[in-house]
């Protein structure tokens, strides 16, 4: 039995994310660099001045756990090092020479990436990033779980009125 079902929001978001990440990984391979797409938010945060996991987390839309895991991979790949602060309470993230060289190569790639995103948005006919930013903002204000609960209450009230 073959039933076609309508994909959910999470499914579509993951699928689009996978398509973008696969394309980026393919391009990194073509550039002949050993690089994972998941490093991008961290490197961009470091380039903008972030120095700690907390600061990187504040610059990105990723969890502290995801950042810490990504930093572990980046450290293993020789892109970053971690250095304890003078007081021993903070750990600072620093690019290695390899990380600095990688960042220089990636700057041009990222400019092309954003131009490609703008072209994709033009083809789609609306600003995808703005739609996602607006959606994230609304979900931060009232989470998806609360929205589901509200919908359930509305449906229960509707059934009660119909009876």
Image (spheres, helix red, strand yellow):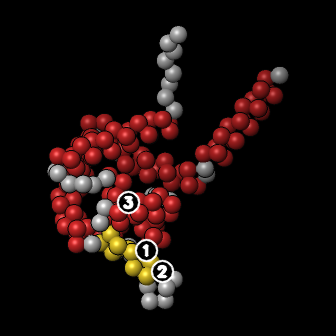
List x then y, in percent, for residue 105: 17, 61
Above or below 82: residue 75: above
**Most foreground residue, 76 or 113:** 76
Residue drawn where x is 27% and y is 41% of the image: 23
Q: Secondary structure at mark 2?
A: loop
List x then y, in percent, for residue 107: 20, 61
Residue 50 lies left or right of residue 153; in this view the side is left
Residue 157 lies left or right of residue 62; in this view the side is right
Q: Earlier in the sequence, mark 3 or mark 2?
A: 3
Residue drawn where x is 43% and y is 47% of the image: 132
Circles 3 and 2: CB atoms closer than 8 Å: no
Residue named by callout 2: 90
Circles 2 and 1: CB atoms closer than 8 Å: yes
- Disc 3 crowd, CA 10 A, few/some/many (<14, 14-19, 20+): some
List x then y, in percent, for residue 30: 17, 46
Q: Secondary structure at mark 3?
A: helix
Q: Secondary structure at mark 1?
A: loop
Residue named by callout 1: 52
Q: Quadrant of residue 34?
A: bottom left
The Cα atoms of the two marked residues, 3 and 1, are separated by 16 Å
Residue named by callout 3: 73
Task: Confirm whether residue 158 shows in the render.
Answer: yes
Q: Quadrant of residue 15?
A: top left
Q: Which mark is residue 40?
A: none
Residue drawn where x is 32% and y is 69% of the image: 80
Above or below 130: residue 84: below
**Most foreground residue, 100 or 118:** 100
The Cα atoms of the two marked residues, 2 and 1, are separated by 7 Å
Circle nearer the viewer, 3 or 1: 3
- Disc 1 crowd, CA 10 A, few/some/many (<14, 14-19, 20+): some
């Amino acid at each position: 039995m073959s039933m076609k079902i309508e994909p959910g929001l999470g499914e579509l978001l993951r699928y689009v994310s996978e398509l973008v990440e696969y394309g980026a990984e393919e391009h990194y391979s073509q550039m002949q660099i050993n690089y994972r797409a998941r490093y991008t938010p961290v490197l961009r945060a470091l380039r903008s001045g972030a120095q700690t996991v907390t600061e990187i987390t504040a610059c990105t839309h990723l969890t502290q756990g995801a950042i810490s895991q990504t930093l572990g991979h980046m450290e293993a790949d020789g892109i970053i090092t971690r250095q304890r602060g003078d007081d021993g309470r903070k750990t600072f993230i620093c690019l290695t020479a390899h990380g600095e060289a990688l960042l220089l190569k990636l700057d041009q790639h990222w400019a092309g990436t954003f131009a490609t995103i703008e072209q994709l948005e033009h083809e789609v006919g609306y600003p995808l990033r703005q739609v996602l930013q607006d959606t994230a903002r609304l979900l931060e204000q009232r989470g998806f779980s609360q929205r589901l609960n509200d919908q359930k209450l509305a449906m229960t009230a509707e059934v009660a009125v119909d009876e």
